[in-house]
Image: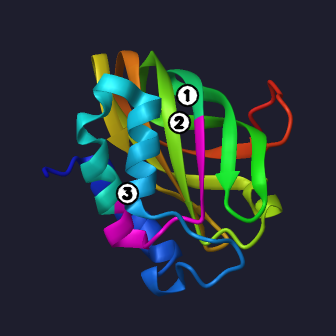
């Protein structure tokens, strides 16, 4: 698998934020790569050809996730950008929850895209720990469609969004995603 600059930067940031040894040492049960890939195939449909490779690479880097989010999002940027999304977070021990995310970004980035998103969540000690800001570097290269992943970190919790979408987008940016239990237009 060939790595993009965005993936290398995201991996370096995430590796600084958490170690693979910490995966699975919290109170929530983990999901196997096969379970994630199966659920992703159902969610992403025919576009999911590269999904198994992305999930296996994430498992190699960060271990097994103890939660995941399935949802959709929209984003646009011209130097500064905004991203809004909504979905459902799944955990083994704490059940399922509706979740929303939004966030600003700044960088060399222009365009717009709409995505189906699966976010793998690592080292989540309790469900309430997801309701914070997760920062990182992101990049996009969409011309009609694409599939990619990045990593965001906060307080030893790693969130790995895997996105497939349509749009026209090119660039790299730095920003954060803020997760909330209710919809809001305020990205800050």
Tags 1 and 2 in contact by the CB under 8 Å rule?
yes
Looking at the picture, does residue 170 appear above or below residue 137? above
The question of residue 54 being in magenta is answered with: no
Q: In the rendered image, which residue does mark 2 sit on?
A: 106
Residue 20: horizontal and vertical position, in percent?
44, 80
Residue 165: horizontal and vertical position, in percent?
40, 22
**Residue 20 appearing in the image:** yes
Q: Callout 1: helix, strand or loop?
A: strand
Q: In the rendered image, which residue does mark 3 sit on?
A: 34
Label 3: few (<14), some (14–19) or many (≥20) C-alpha neighbours in 10 Å: few
Q: Callout 2: helix, strand or loop?
A: strand
Sequence order check, earlier mark of 3 and 2: 3
Q: In the rendered image, which residue does mark 1 sit on?
A: 80
Q: Give the number of marks.
A: 3
Q: Nearer the viewer, residue 58 or 6?
A: 58
Residues drawn in magenta: 58-70
Picture residue at 31% right of the left edge, 19% below the top: 145
Picture residue at 22% right of the left edge, 47% below the top: 4
Q: CA distance from mark 3 to mark 1?
A: 37 Å
Tags 3 and 1 in contact by the CB under 8 Å rule?
no
Residue 81: horizontal and vertical position, in percent?
56, 27
Q: CA distance from mark 1 to mark 2?
A: 4 Å
In the image, taking residue 135 as reference, residue 187 lies left or right, namely right
Label 1: few (<14), some (14–19) or many (≥20) C-alpha neighbours in 10 Å: some
């Amino acid at each position: 698998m060939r790595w993009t600059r965005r993936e290398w930067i995201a991996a370096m940031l995430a590796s600084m934020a958490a170690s693979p040894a910490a995966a699975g040492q919290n109170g929530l049960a983990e999901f196997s790569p096969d379970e994630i890939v199966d659920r992703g195939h159902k969610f992403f449909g025919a576009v999911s050809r590269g999904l198994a490779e992305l999930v296996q690479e994430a498992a190699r880097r960060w271990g097994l996730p103890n939660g995941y989010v399935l949802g959709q999002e929209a984003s646009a940027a011209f130097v500064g950008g905004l991203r809004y999304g909504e979905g459902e977070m799944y955990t083994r021990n704490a059940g399922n929850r509706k979740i929303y995310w939004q966030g600003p970004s700044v960088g060399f980035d222009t365009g717009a895209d709409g995505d189906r998103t699966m976010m793998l969540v690592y080292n989540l000690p309790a469900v309430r720990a997801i309701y914070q800001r997760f920062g990182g570097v992101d990049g996009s290269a969409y011309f009609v469609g694409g599939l990619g992943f990045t990593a965001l970190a906060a307080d030893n919790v790693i969130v790995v969004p895997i996105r497939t979408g349509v749009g026209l987008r090119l660039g790299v940016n730095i920003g954060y995603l803020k997760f909330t239990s209710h919809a809001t237009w305020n990205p800050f």
